[in-house]
Image: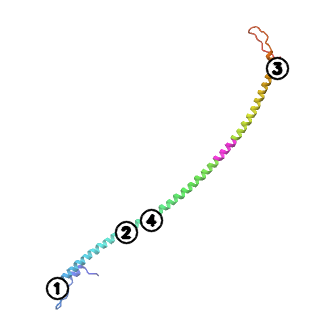
């Protein structure tokens, strides 16, 4: 067990003939006691400081461990979000491709339908033009025919006022 300042203070030396000077020894012992007390106080302060720093170190070690766990959880969450975003992006792209194919298919079908309608309208236009041409030609033939000239030379008979008979055809 280490010596205490009190042990040093209470230490009695045996006296011998022509021994050490008692005042000098007591003065030296007083100086040793003071220094020893100071060292014990410093040691106690250092032990308290070591305990305090150890406590802080443990606190910061716990914080570090918690932060590391939080970082791992955040990284895992970020990876999960990234995976989910990629899955969602793939689904959106797949849906967009299906919609694009449907739109293209619908557009092609409408294009074919319009092309068929245009062909039908062209055919109807040709038929109409042919019939109209035939009608116009028939009318021209009638105008150019002799019957027309005879009709133009025909004179209406004089009828009494108010009573006209319809023209009869010859």
- Distance from Cα at disc 1 to Cα at disc 2: 51 Å
Identify whether 62 is placed above or below 124: below
Local secondary structure at mark 4? helix
Determine the main secondary structure of the stretch shown in magenta.
helix
Query: Which residue occupies the foreground of this view, 60 or 112?
Result: 112
Local secondary structure at mark 2? helix
- Distance from Cα at disc 4 to Cα at disc 2: 16 Å
Mark 4 or 3, which is nearer the eye?
3
x and y percent of residue 105 in the render?
66, 47
- Does residue 87 appear to the left or right of 43 in the view shown? right
* Within-10-Å neighbours for mark 1: few <14, some 14–19, many 20+: few
Q: Which residue is mark 3?
A: 147
Q: Which residue is mark 2?
A: 57
N-terminal label among 3 and 1: 1
Q: Which residue is mark 4?
A: 68
* Within-10-Å neighbours for mark 3: few <14, some 14–19, many 20+: few
Tell me which residue sits at (22%, 81%) in the image. 8
x and y percent of residue 3 in the render?
26, 81
- Distance from Cα at disc 4 to Cα at disc 3: 115 Å
Mark 3 or 1, which is nearer the eye?
3
Return the residue found at the far top: 160
- Does residue 94 appear to the left or right of 159 in the view shown? left
Asked whether 62 falls inside the magenta stretch, the response is no
Label count reads 4
- Distance from Cα at disc 3 to Cα at disc 2: 129 Å
Q: Are marks 1 and 2 in contact (CB under 8 Å)?
A: no
Q: Are marks 3 and 1 in contact (CB under 8 Å)?
A: no
Residue range in magenta is 103-113
């Amino acid at each position: 067990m280490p010596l205490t300042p009190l042990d040093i203070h209470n230490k009695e030396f045996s006296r011998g003939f022509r021994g050490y000077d008692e005042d000098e020894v007591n003065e030296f012992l007083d100086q040793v006691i003071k220094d020893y007390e100071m060292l014990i106080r410093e040691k106690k302060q250092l032990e308290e400081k070591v305990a305090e720093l150890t406590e802080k170190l443990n606190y910061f070690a716990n914080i570090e461990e918690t932060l590391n766990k939080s970082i791992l959880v955040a990284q895992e969450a970020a990876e999960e979000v990234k995976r989910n975003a990629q899955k969602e992006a793939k689904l959106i792209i797949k849906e967009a491709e299906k919609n694009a194919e449907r739109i293209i298919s619908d557009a092609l079908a409408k294009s074919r339908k319009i092309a068929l309608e245009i062909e039908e309208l062209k055919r109807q236009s040709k038929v109409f033009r042919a019939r109209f041409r035939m009608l116009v030609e028939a009318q021209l033939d009638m105008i150019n025919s002799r019957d027309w000239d005879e009709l133009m030379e025909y004179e209406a008979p004089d009828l009494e006022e108010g009573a006209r008979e319809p023209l009869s055809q010859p």
